[in-house]
Structures are given as structure tokens and as C-alpha cells.
Amino acid sequence: MKFLEKLSDLVGKYMAFIVLVIAALALFAPNTVSFIKTSYVNTLLGIVMFGMGLTLKASDFKVVFSRPKDVIIGCVSQFTIMPLLAFLLTKLFNLPVELAVGVILVGTCPGGTSSNVMTYLAKGDVALSVGMTSVSTILAPFLTPLLTYVFAGQTVDVNMVEMFMSIVKVVIIPIVLGGLINKFFSHITQKIVKILPLISVTAIVAIVAAVVSANAAKIMTSGLLIVLVVILHNCCGYGLGYVIGKVLKLDMSKCKAIAIEVGMQNSGLATSLAGTHFAQYPLATIPGAVFSVWHNISGAIFANFMANKE
């Protein structure tokens, strides 16, 4: 167990590098990871969400009730800035429909699970970050389908009810199960939590490998454009999230948390929804996969930079 704990710490520390290496392998030598099928994505995401549920405690929601204003500011920013940015970028770069859908899905998803770690590294308000991630994830079954319909419904058929059910199945149910197990069997989960980074990173890496290897040829032809759009989306999210906090005169630790929470998305969910509901557009899964790679790199860099800001 000690070995697994040390390995888990190591994997968590070098997550960005590991994801980048596997993504490159899947892109340039897709046959090496082609055994990981895109049909596994929903299950893999469910594992990540179950792991998130195992770490949740009732106290994590204390911030929601003790500081509702901060959480509301963060969640409103999350579900306005990122969807609008996604929509504007698809228009600015005149993206084809299948890429546009993928970018919009990334924008309409809740905050990413690694945002809490990045907020900690940035010396930000971790309690606020955890509260925002939890609330935005709970709101996702309602807001993600609705916002996807608003921003993509003019060009593609968006079935909001089916999307709602998908998010409940792969996000909400695993989180609730994880939370219940943590509540009633905390003596066991306290041991499991120590190796969760290993499990979560393995699942995230597998999702990236599956999507990238399955679409390697298409990525090679339009990869630079996708990467550029993803980088702009993510970095503008950090910047605008931070500006919102400053404009509303929040302290620096809260500004850091909101910036990171807004900029980092649950791109695994975007990939899952693209593969499930927009299978007729194979490239729709790519923006989510690229975002998964990039935001872990940028998040570490941004957190390192913000750690020196007081």
C-alpha cells in the first residue's frame, strides 16, 4: 500500500507531463494505445467522478451556505464566461460544425476536478474552489444541456433530455455513490483516498489516449487550429475569471480560485457527451481531449505564477 501511495503522489505531481506524453504517443503512434476504445470513455469518466465523490464531505459544502455570494459569483462566471468564449471563438475562427460542437461542449461543462489542486498550488481559496466545483457539477445536468442548446442548437440537433440523463449517469450517480460510501465507510475510504490520484490520472490518461488515437489522422490535418482555439479558450477563461473577481473587489485568494475554476473545465465530460450525443461528428470529441491535455499544463504554470501574487 505504501508503494501505491508513493506512486500516487508521483503521478499526481507529474500529471501534466504524463498526459502530454500519452497524448503525443496516441497521436504519433496510435496503434500503441488503440486497445483503449472510445466506448470506454463514459466508464472511465464515471471512475473519475466516483473518486471525486469519495473525497467529498459535508464540510465541503459549508462554504456554499457560509459564503453564498462567493460561490454564486464563481458559478455564474463559470456558466457565462466559458460558454460565451467558446461560441465567440467558433465564430472568430469559422470552425466547421463538428469542431464547433466540441468547443461549445467544453465551454458549457462544469469546473474540472484538478482545479482544486491548482488553487491550492496557487495559494488560493481552496474551500471556495471545492465549493464551486461541487455546485457547478450539481448544476451541470440542467445547465450544460441548456447552454449547449442555446449556443449550438441552431446548427446541430441537441437533445437536452438525453444529455441530462447522460450527465446524471456518468457524473451525478458516481459522485453520490462515492459520497455515500465515504460517509458510511470512512475508515476504508481514508485509505483509498491516498491512491486516488493514481486512479484518476490513469482514467484521464486513458480517455485522452482513446480519443486521440481514434482520431489521430484527422487531428494531424487540423490539429494546430484546435490547439490554438483550446489555448485561447482556456487562457481567456483564467484572465476573465480573475478580472471578475477584481472588479467585484474580492480578495486575492478568492480571485485566484475563481480564475482557476473558470478556466479549467471538466473536459472529460465534454468528450463523453460529444461521443455519446454527437457521434455523427467524430471530431467533436477532439476539443475535449486537447483541453484535457492543455489545461493541466497551463493550470500548473498559472498556479505557479499566481502563487507569488498577494
Image (cartoon, grey):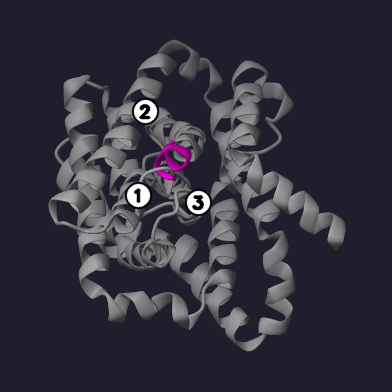
- In the orientation shown, which residue stands out farthest toward the top? 221
Q: Is residue 48 above or below residue 58?
A: above
Q: Residue at x 17, y 26 (%)?
A: 91
Magenta span dominant secondary structure: helix
**What is the three-letter code of the residue carrying label 2?**
Ile
Left or right: residue 166 versus residue 300 is left
The N terminus, quarter of image: bottom right
Q: Dot 3: few (<14), some (14–19), or many (≥20) neighbours within 10 Å?
A: many
Give the mark nearer the N terminus: 1 vs 3. 3
Q: Position of residue 229 (x, y in %)?
A: 32, 25
Chain part drawn in magenta: 302-307
**What is the three-letter code of the residue carrying label 3?**
Ser
Mark 2 or mark 1, whichever is nearer to me = 1
The kind of secondary structure element at disc 3 is: loop
Disc 2: which residue: 231
Question: Which is more toward the observer, 224 or 44?
Answer: 224
Q: Are marks 2 and 3 in contact (CB under 8 Å)?
A: no
Q: Dot 2: few (<14), some (14–19), or many (≥20) neighbours within 10 Å?
A: some
Q: Position of residue 189 (x, y in %)?
A: 68, 75
Magenta segment: does it hold 305? yes
Q: Position of residue 50 (x, y in %)?
A: 57, 66
Disc 3: which residue: 114
Mark 1 or mark 3, whichever is nearer to me = 1
Residue 208 appears in the rendering:
yes
Q: Residue at x 20, y 70 (%)?
A: 69
Marks 1/3: CA distance? 22 Å
Q: Which mark is residue 109?
A: none
Disc 1: which residue: 310
